[in-house]
Amino acid sequence: MPIITIEIFPQEYAKKVEIAKVFTDELSRITGIPKEPISVIFRDLTPEHAATAGVMLAEKYRDMQSK
């Protein structure tokens, strides 16, 4: 049973539906695995749980909002 895990900032439900469909369709197409056993799991991130270039995203957003 293939499991696709997507870690992403919170998205609207409709967007998650589209993402799950596209990833499932493409994995099935590329590998030949039927769609039924493919699972997609979303893990919502928040800016307090991620960093780029060593700087927490919460700090980057705070700096952007203050400008």
Image (cartoon, helix red, strand yellow):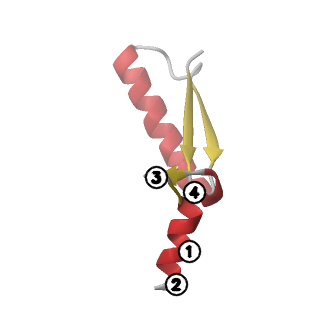
In the displayed structure, would residue 37 be above or below residue 48? above
Q: Earlier in the sequence, mark 1 or mark 4?
A: 4
Residue ID for mark 4: 11
Instruction: Tell me which amino acid carries mark 3.
Output: Thr
Pair 4/3: label in front? 3
User: Dot 1: what SS?
Assistant: helix
Contact between marks 1 and 4 (CB within 8 A): the answer is: no
| Disc sitting over residue 62 in the figure | 1
Contact between marks 2 and 1 (CB within 8 A): the answer is: yes
Contact between marks 4 and 3 (CB within 8 A): the answer is: no
The x, y position of residue 35, in whole percent, is 52, 23
Binning the other alpha carbons within 10 Å of mark 3 as few (below 14), some (14 to 19) or many (20 upward) gives few
Instruction: Tell me which amino acid carries mark 4.
Output: Gln
Q: Earlier in the sequence, mark 2 or mark 4?
A: 4
Real-space Cα separation, disc 1 to disc 4, in angstroms:
20 Å
Which quadrant of the figure has residue 10? Answer: bottom right
Binning the other alpha carbons within 10 Å of mark 1 as few (below 14), some (14 to 19) or many (20 upward) gives few
Real-space Cα separation, disc 2 to disc 3, in angstroms:
19 Å
The x, y position of residue 28, in whole percent, is 43, 22
Real-space Cα separation, disc 2 to disc 4, in angstroms:
24 Å
